[in-house]
Image (spheres, rainbow, N blue to C red):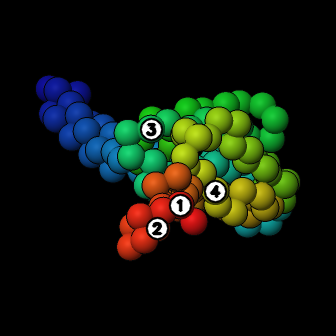
């Protein structure tokens, strides 16, 4: 009887734990931190992609794992970076010929790495047209 009464508590705890991480991108490593030795920690690398719209772009972590972002959102590499180690994210595929993505793509992991990626449209031929004088600049 005692084991049966613990089941609803365990189930509600499991449901709460699963929903606490929904929409955060990466798993939470807060409880894995070693304050004595940074090199004992492993940290996720998270990309927060903005202004990509319906296009896609690809990103590569330290020449290894590649992920493709298909629209705005939070994307996480499954590979982790050891504390105190450098990281570099390369943009291996831009979203289109008329747009460019960028951000601060290098650093040293001392906690969860969160990189803001912003994508902007480049100037097109229509931007160079002088509408007032009906001619090309």
Question: Alpha carbon of mark 3 to alpha carbon of mark 2: how far?
Answer: 29 Å
Question: Alpha carbon of mark 3 to alpha carbon of mark 4: how far?
Answer: 15 Å
Q: Residue visible at 38% across and 39% down?
A: 54
Instruction: Give percent across and percent down for residue 18.
Output: 33, 40
Instruction: Give percent across and percent down for residue 105.
Output: 72, 56
Q: Residue visible at 74% across and 44% down?
A: 90
Q: Earlier in the sequence, mark 1 or mark 4?
A: 4
- Alpha-carbon neighbours of circle 1 within 10 Å: few (<14), some, or many (≥20)? few
Q: Is residue 101 above or below residue 131?
A: above
Instruction: Give percent across and percent down for residue 36.
Output: 80, 66
Q: Nearer the viewer, residue 53 or 110?
A: 53
Number of the label disc, if any, that sits on residue 136: 1
Question: Alpha carbon of mark 2 to alpha carbon of mark 4: how far?
Answer: 29 Å
Mark 2 highlights which residue? Answer: 130
> Could you tell me if residue 32 is visible in this image?
no
Q: Earlier in the sequence, mark 3 or mark 4?
A: 3
> Could you tell me if residue 64 is visible in this image?
yes
| C-beta proximity under 8 Å, tags 2 and 1 | yes
Q: Is residue 11 above or below residue 122?
A: above
Specify whether 78 is left or right of 80.
left
Number of the label disc, if any, that sits on residue 102: 4
């Amino acid at each position: 009887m005692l084991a049966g009464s613990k089941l609803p508590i365990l189930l509600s705890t499991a449901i709460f734990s699963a929903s606490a991480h929904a929409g955060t991108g990466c798993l939470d490593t807060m409880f894995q931190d070693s304050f004595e030795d940074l090199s004992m920690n492993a940290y996720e690398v998270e990309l927060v992609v903005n202004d990509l719209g319906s296009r896609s772009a690809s990103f590569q972590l330290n020449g290894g794992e590649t992920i493709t972002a298909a629209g705005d959102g939070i994307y996480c590499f499954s590979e982790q970076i050891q504390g105190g180690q450098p990281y570099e994210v390369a943009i291996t595929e831009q979203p289109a010929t008329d747009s460019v993505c960028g951000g601060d793509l290098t650093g040293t992991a001392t906690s969860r790495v969160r990189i803001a990626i912003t994508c902007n449209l480049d100037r097109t031929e229509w931007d160079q047209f002088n509408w007032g004088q009906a001619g090309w600049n």
